[in-house]
Image (tube, rainbow, N blue to C red):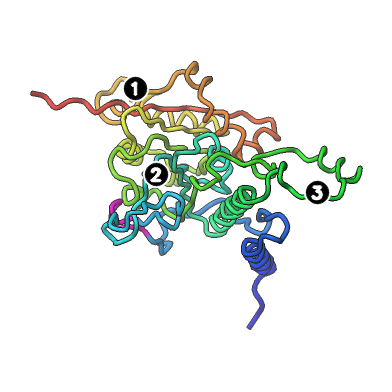
Amino acid sequence: MSAPPPKRQKREQYRKKAAAAAGNETQGKVKLPQKKFYRQRAHANPFSDHQLDYPLSPAHMDWSSHYPAYVNPDSEQTTLSGAPKLLKDVEVVDIGCGFGGLLVGLAPLLPETLMLGLEIRTQVLEYLATRIQALRTQQQKLKTSPTPATESPSAPSTPADEAASDAATPTPETSNKLIAGGYQNISALRSNTMKFFPNFFRRQQLSKIFICFPDPHFKARKHKARIISENLNAEYAYALRPGGLLYTITDVEEYHHWVLRHFREEGEDQASEGGVKDLFERVTEEELANDPCVAVMKEATEEGKKVTRNKGNKYVAVFRRKADPEWPA
């Protein structure tokens, strides 16, 4: 029997080291996973049978393993599947979350909001799950470590140590500061949004949906695989509460115009009655300039950073869920 691929062997070695460090507080800093061992092709066929697990309904979903810090202590409060309920609901969803840059960036910005990433690629999801667990472990160790006032004297730092400290760029993942929420409010799971989105979220549960740099599926025969369409937009509207926001960003101008057309904001369908036009309205540029989530969406995601490095354009469109019209008397 042949040995596993080198990339998988590296992942296994990292997991063993991370588990050992998490179980022993005397170990050094918990290291984040290295993305190069979890690379996977960007394209995944959403119409294939990926043998995914999904709940029968949102009331059957077990969230306890995703957000253990928010599990309801009342053991009698359970889901229809018998799992413990949470103290609050998931409110923010990142569709096609990739390596989780948006979730990690939003975690300290919305520390009391439960956020979920949906990703169909197995290795990418494995990286993100490992990343979140490492971040949580880092934060837990910072909470339990002695404060500077009570810390025992240590050896003076050398000039080399000080230089290395000055050269390090502080980020939410590498700084030695406690982050609000301790990354307990973010998680991710494997799912096919095009098939099972309504199985996870009930009507008007969500306050924000993010679709960041989706696969453009350039060929015309592949457009049916795009994550934004008339039918899918109706499902997003079902899960969004009135006033909730749907954020989109892409570096492909043609896809941006596709988004506007399918939200009835551009083209011949703009004047038509009914459909998505009655469910969403586009947020103005002035509002976007004051929305911190837009800045995170532009700069915190891996694709956003790559577009910035390549000096490309980013096209943003955000849509607000309208209130449902009243039934005629």
> Residue most toward the right?
159
Residue 40 part of the magenta-drawn span: no
Look at the numbered disc 1 and give the secondary structure of its residue.
Answer: helix
Q: Tell me the SS state at disc 2.
A: strand
Residues in magenta, as a range: 54-61
Distance from disc 3 to disc 2, alpha carbons, whole Å, reads 44 Å
Closer to the camera in the image, 4 or 161: 161
Prevailing SS of the magenta stretch: loop
Q: Which quarter shows the N terminus? A: bottom right
Q: Is residue 104 left or right of residue 175?
A: left
What is the three-letter code of the residue carrying label 1? Gln
The residue labelled by disc 2 is 90
Q: Is residue 247 above or below residue 136?
A: above
Q: Is residue 58 magenta?
A: yes
- Looking at marks 3 and 2 on the same chain, the residue that comes earlier in the sequence is marked by 2
Q: Looking at this view, is 203 or 192 the one in front?
A: 203
Quadrant where the C terminus sits is top left
Residue on which disc 3 sits: 153
Q: Is residue 250 left or right of residue 201?
A: right
**Where residue 86 sits in the image (x, y, percent)?**
37, 50
First of labels 1, 2 by sequence position = 2
- Quick one: which residue is furthest to the top in this view? 286
Badge nearest the viewer, 1 or 2? 2
Question: Mark 1 = which residue?
Answer: 270
Tell me which numbered mark, 3 or 1, is placed earlier along the sequence: 3
- Residue 128 image position (x, y, % from top left): 56, 53
Q: Estimate how packed mark 2 is, as few (under 14), some (14 to 19) or many (20 or more) residues with alpha carbons within 10 Å.
A: many
